[in-house]
Image (spheres, rainbow, N blue to C red):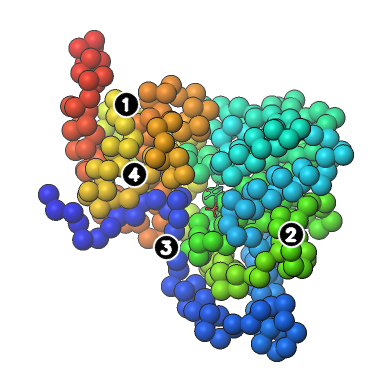
Amino acid sequence: MNRPTNTIYLDNAATTPMHPEVITVMTEVMKNTYGNASSVYHVGQDAKAVLEEARSSVAQSLNCLPNEVYFTGCGSEADNWAIKGYAMANRKKGNHIITTKIEHHAILHPCEYLEKNGFEVTYLPVDETGLVSLEDVKNAIKDTTILISVMYANNEVGTIEPIAEIAKIAKEHGVCMHTDAVQAVGAEAINFQELGVDMLSLSGHKFGGPKGVGALIIRKGLRIEPFMHGGAQERSKRAGTENLAGIVGLAKALEISVANIPEKQEKMKEMRDYLISEIEKNIPYIKFNGHREHRLANNVNFCFRYIEGESLLLMLDINGICASSGSACTSGSLDPSHVLLALGLPHEIAHGSLRLTLSANTTKEELDFTVSKLQEIVHRLRLMSPIYDMSLEEN
Ligand SMILES: *Cc1c(COP(=O)(O)O)cnc(C)c1O
């Protein structure tokens, strides 16, 4: 069995290949716009103009004001800043933060850090499909609550949360609302004004842009501490000479991504549902994870009983297929995914999870090959599994 010459990349939630047009505009900037946007002479002012053009473009793509766009070093930085920066600037108002058990670690770990520093955090549960309940949000709010942070779409199981509804509740109670929209920007139509949140995180490399650049959208007038202290860049909120090529690349990738969301979604949903039904048809003892409808158009997540997710990944890789078990940040550790545990899966089942995330270019042939290999691999791994043996004897 030879490894196919073509890689089948089904891990678009971990990162995406850059769009060719993005590489072109970034190369132009790297060649021609070398100035420091803070310099007064024309070479610097050219860089400043390119920077502000990118800011306006991002604002237009998300329907916010250009001055509400703050460029960061990545999605994790945007998340850290939103949580810690808001908490530190508003601690006189209260010390209570509400988030969920299924957030990315870029939210959970800053929250744990704040807990060690005098803040109180409520981690809301989710139901077995990964949805947060609006009742739970309402009931968790108290006099000391200053911030609610709920992710737009979960990076492991793809569940899309009712963000506009939660933002409405937050507003009614005078509480600030942040959403980690890193998985949703470029994939779902997002209108910052209509959504009603106060802060929103995004990351370039999740929608065809470069790695190492993100943004935090901060509603005009919101009180937040600077993330980085130093120069006056990003209106004195985030010091450091701007990653101009990266910022231009992020803006271009966003412009391309938001241009045809409905068409892309329709195409990906068809492929996604085909993949789900083929897996369910051909492989026994599996569990579908996440919500069937409120789900990212490109996300497929299953648990395969009696199997370790890591072995599955290795054997798929031998066959040229890139996939993920839990999230990329946690692979390497033997802990099962905190998201699957929050969905109520027992440890031994949560260990055998597989996430396949498609792109708009994923083909049916790629999916057919993947399912046939998956079927073979799952069968082979189960034959080697002592628990599988035992359970067969019981039945
Ligand atoms: C990828 C991801 C992040 C982190 O973004 P980076 O740019 O890789 O730091 C944060 N939140 C979610 C939901 C993500 O999927």
**CA–CA distance in space, label 2 to label 1:** 49 Å
* Between discs 2 and 1, the one toward the N terminus: 2
Q: Position of residue 100 (x, y in %)?
A: 62, 33
Disc 3 element: loop
**CA–CA distance in space, label 3 to label 4:** 21 Å
Tell me the residue at 28%/58% (across/down). 7
Residue at mark 2: C-beta within 8 A of ligand 1: no
Quadrant, the C terminus: top left
Check disc 1 and report the residue beneath it: 305
* Between discs 3 and 1, the one toward the N terminus: 3
Q: Is residue 313 above or below residue 341?
A: below
**CA–CA distance in space, label 3 to label 1:** 32 Å
* Labels 2 and 3 touching (C-beta < 8 A): no
Drawn side of residue 26 relative to residue 41, left or right? left
Check disc 4 and report the residue beneath it: 275
Q: Position of residue 55 (x, y in %)?
A: 68, 69
* Between discs 4 and 1, the one toward the N terminus: 4
Drawn side of residue 36 relative to residue 19, left or right? right
User: Three-letter amino acid code at disc 4?
Assistant: Leu
What numbered label is drawn on residue 17?
A: 3
Drawn side of residue 211 relative to residue 135, left or right? left
User: Three-letter amino acid code at disc 1?
Assistant: Arg
Q: Position of residue 12 (x, y in %)?
A: 43, 53
The quarter of the picture where residue 227 lies is: bottom right
Residue nearest the viewer, comparing 355 with 263: 355
User: Three-letter amino acid code at disc 2?
Assistant: His
Disc 4 element: helix
Marks 2 and 3: which is nearer the front? Answer: 2
Q: Quick one: label 2, few (<14), some, or many (20+) residues within 10 Å?
A: few
Marks 4 and 2: which is nearer the front? Answer: 2
Outermost residue, bottom direction?
A: 42
